[in-house]
């Protein structure tokens, strides 16, 4: 179980110089299993809203797939997958609100969950812009990596080795960075009226101080995305709402939250 930190460890972000860091708790490695159990319960309590968001999360990759199929540029499949992972945290805001309302024993609604996306409007739009910049950055990097693709050679594992290795390393590095800054940023912006820098630094600090637990949680997310892709995104109908709910419960379990706060 998570435990409240008595003081910030030396490896934590104690003084950024431009934003404060909200204290976090120490997580057990497998705490995310508990988050998934709570998320499954939320799904059962709000099936209609959950499936509505599931449909949205399914339509997005379907649209990407058919766009790729229409243009015939199959080399953008991998960048599109990373872009989907970048967009996910922002779209999950509505799901966080559903779990929040259930936690306060309120009746969740789809309309209320949509309003939650703009509760801390300025900073949430700033977060969206940050994600957009990261998407553009990744697409630019992906186009540069494409230079290593063997256009005029036989497609063998050896000829593709440089392209695959560089693409994988760069994609992995960007994914890790994105996970650090997005793991808890959106829930923080919803639950507290804080600035974006505070939310991002708090997220990075919490992930860094709980590296093993968050690595396990990130592995679950990656496995879930992989299952979604091998099922031609159909599994996202259920998987993405559950991951969204679990992320909220992870936030409640990790960050020193103001659980008594309510909003309309």
Image (cartoon, rainbow, N blue to C red):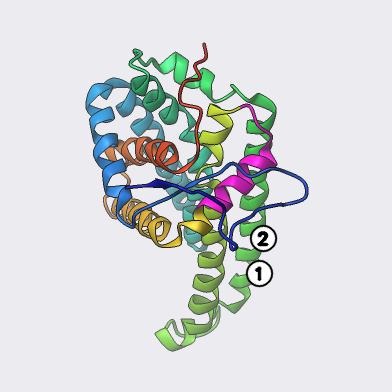
Do the residues bearing badges 1 and 2 touch, measured as CB atoms within 8 Å? yes
Q: Where is residue 135 in the image (x, y as percent from the top left)?
A: 61, 51
Q: Report the residue at 70% width, 28% height from top.
A: 122
The total number of labels drawn is: 2
Q: What element carries label 1?
A: helix
Q: Give percent across and percent down for residue 87.
A: 53, 43
Res 123 label? none
Residue labelled with disc 1: 144
Taken as a whole, is the magenta stretch helix, strand or loop?
Answer: helix
Using residue 80 as the reference point, say whether residue 215 is left or right of it: left
Estimate the x, y position of residue 256 in percent, counting from the top left.
50, 38
Q: Disc 2 designates what residue?
A: 140
**What residue range appears in magenta?**
193-206
- CA gap between label 1 and label 2 equals 7 Å
Relative to 224, is 57 above or below? above
Foreground residue among 227 and 46: 46
- Counting from the top left corner in percent of width and height, residue 221 is at 37, 52
For this rendering, which residue is in front, 167 or 209? 209
Q: In this view, does 237 lie above or below 97?
A: below
Residue reaching furthest to the right: 17
Identified at 47% across, 81% down, the residue is 160
The residue under the point 57% across, 69% down is 170
**Residue 127, image quadrant:** top right
Question: Can residue 76 be seen from the camera position used here?
Answer: no
Is residue 194 in the magenta section? Answer: yes
Question: Can residue 30 be seen in the rendering of this structure?
Answer: yes
């Amino acid at each position: 179980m998570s435990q409240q930190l008595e003081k910030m460890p030396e490896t934590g972000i104690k003084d950024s110089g431009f934003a404060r860091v909200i204290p976090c708790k120490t997580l057990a490695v497998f705490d995310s299993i508990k988050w998934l159990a709570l998320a499954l319960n939320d799904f059962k309590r709000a099936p209609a809203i959950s499936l509505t968001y599931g449909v949205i999360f399914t339509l997005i990759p379907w649209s990407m797939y058919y766009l790729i199929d229409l243009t015939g540029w199959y080399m953008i499949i991998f960048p599109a997958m990373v872009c989907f992972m970048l967009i996910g945290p922002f779209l999950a805001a509505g799901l966080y609100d559903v779990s929040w309302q259930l936690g306060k024993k309120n009746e969740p609604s789809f309309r209320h969950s949509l309003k939650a996306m703009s509760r801390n409007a300025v900073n949430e739009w700033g977060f969206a812009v940050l994600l957009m910049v990261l998407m553009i950055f990744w697409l630019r990097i992906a186009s540069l990596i494409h230079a290593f693709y063997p256009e005029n050679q036989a497609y063998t594992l050896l000829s593709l080795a440089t392209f695959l290795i560089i693409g994988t390393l760069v994609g992995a590095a960007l994914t890790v960075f994105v996970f650090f800054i997005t793991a808890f940023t959106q829930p923080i912006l919803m639950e507290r009226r804080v600035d974006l820098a505070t939310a991002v630094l708090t997220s990075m600090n919490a992930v860094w101080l709980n590296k093993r637990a968050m690595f396990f949680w990130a592995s679950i997310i990656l496995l879930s995305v992989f299952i979604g892709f091998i099922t031609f995104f159909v599994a996202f109908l259920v998987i993405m709402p559950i991951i969204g709910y679990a992320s909220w419960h992870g936030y409640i379990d990790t960050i020193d939250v103001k659980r008594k706060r309510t909003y309309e």
